[in-house]
Structure formats: C-alpha cells, structure tokens
Image: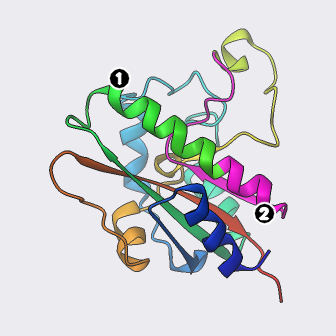
Amino acid sequence: MTEQLLIHAAIELGFSNAAAMDTKDLIFVPSFRPLCEENLCGKFGVNYACPPDCGSVEEMKARILQWPRAVVLQTMWDIEDPMEESQTKPAKAKHNAMTRELIDKASVPGLMVGAGGCSLCSPCAIVEGKPCRFPGLRYSCMSAYCVFVKEMAEHCGMEYDCGPGVVAFFSMFCFQPDN
C-alpha cells in the first residue's frame, strides 16, 4: 500500500489527520525517559512494551530508524481534564485500536508506535512471569521511544496544543515504502 493510500485509509477510519514523514527527521530526546519512571500511566515495570522492559533509549530509536518512513496519525478528543484518566484512557484505547486497524488493512510489515503503552492484555503477562502473549502485535508508546511528539506534529503540519477542552493523541506506523 502506498503512503497516499495509507493516509487516505487513515482519514476514512476516522483519524483527524494523517501525514507521512521520514523517520530520520524524528527528534529523539533521551531525557524524556525519566518521565516514564514517574509511572503516571501505571505501566512502568509491569508491561513488556514499557520501560524498563521495552529496551534502552538507543534500542528503541534503532527500532524506529530501521523503517525509513512513517505515517503519523492524529485524533482529537473533547476532554475537559487531560489528567483525568477516566476520560483519556478510552480515547487512547480507541486511537490505538484505529491504528491497529489501519496497520491490519495496510497488510505490510512495519512497526506500530502507540498513543499509550500496549494494552492488548490485562494484566500484561510480565506480571505473571510469563512471555508476551502477542510479541508480534505488542506496541510501545511515543514516550518509551523518547520521540519529541510536539516537533513531530509540527513537522507534519498538525496541531499539538489544540486549545482548552481538546486533547490530541498521536501514533505512528513505521514502514518500508513501495518503490
């Protein structure tokens, strides 16, 4: 599937915006990793897709950069309080489900970078001391990869700060384009 078809399919699925970019143009900020350690999402150390178990900052960056292109996906949600998990969690789940649906529809190899950490299993098998149940579908979030999302959004011509009461979520599908 070509980039333009991916973008068109993303908009048809309900994404607010979609744009393609070179992964080499992403900005990675290793100093973002300690934000994961604050564990505001509750997944630090209890999810294979999250730090410290997902890999080092360098390993995560290399994972993205092995794919030359990315389709950046954005949804916008009416959420009064972005710190209120009861409002953000369902929106992130829907965003990630739409991302997975687009990837399944594309039917090409690639890497999903989610709007939040993997939530395929609850609880993650790591807390039971078992291997990941879905290693091929597992996805890490932008924060785990230390992607500077604001810069990525601006690079793609997307709003990062959407104003009061509106929250934007971002994900990516990194892939090898058709030649």
Of the pair 46 and 57, the residue shown nearer to us: 46
Badge 2: few (under 14), some or many (20 or more) residues near its Cα, within 10 Å? some
Of the pair 82 and 15, the residue shown nearer to us: 15
Of the pair 103 and 24, the residue shown nearer to us: 103
Query: Taking 55 as reference, is 16 left or right?
Result: left
Across and down, in percent, residue 14 comes to 53, 56
Query: Taking 74 as reference, is 165 left or right?
Result: left
Across and down, in percent, residue 9 comes to 66, 66
The image shows residue 60, relative to residue 126, as above or below, that is below
Badge 2 is on which residue?
106
Q: How far, Cα to Cα, is label 2 from label 1? A: 31 Å
Would you say residue 120 sits in the magenta stretch?
yes
Query: Taking 113 as reference, is 106 left or right?
Result: right
Across and down, in percent, residue 11 comes to 55, 65
Would you say residue 16 sits in the magenta stretch?
no
Label 2 with label 1: CB-CB less than 8 Å? no
User: For the residue marked with disc 1, what is the amino acid?
Assistant: Ser
The image shows residue 52, relative to residue 42, as above or below, that is below
Q: Along the polypeptide, which appears first: circle 2 or circle 1?
A: 1
Q: Please tell me the numbered disc located at residue 86.
A: 1
Query: Which segment is the magenta one?
Result: 100-122
Asked which quadrant contains residue 38, the reply is: top left
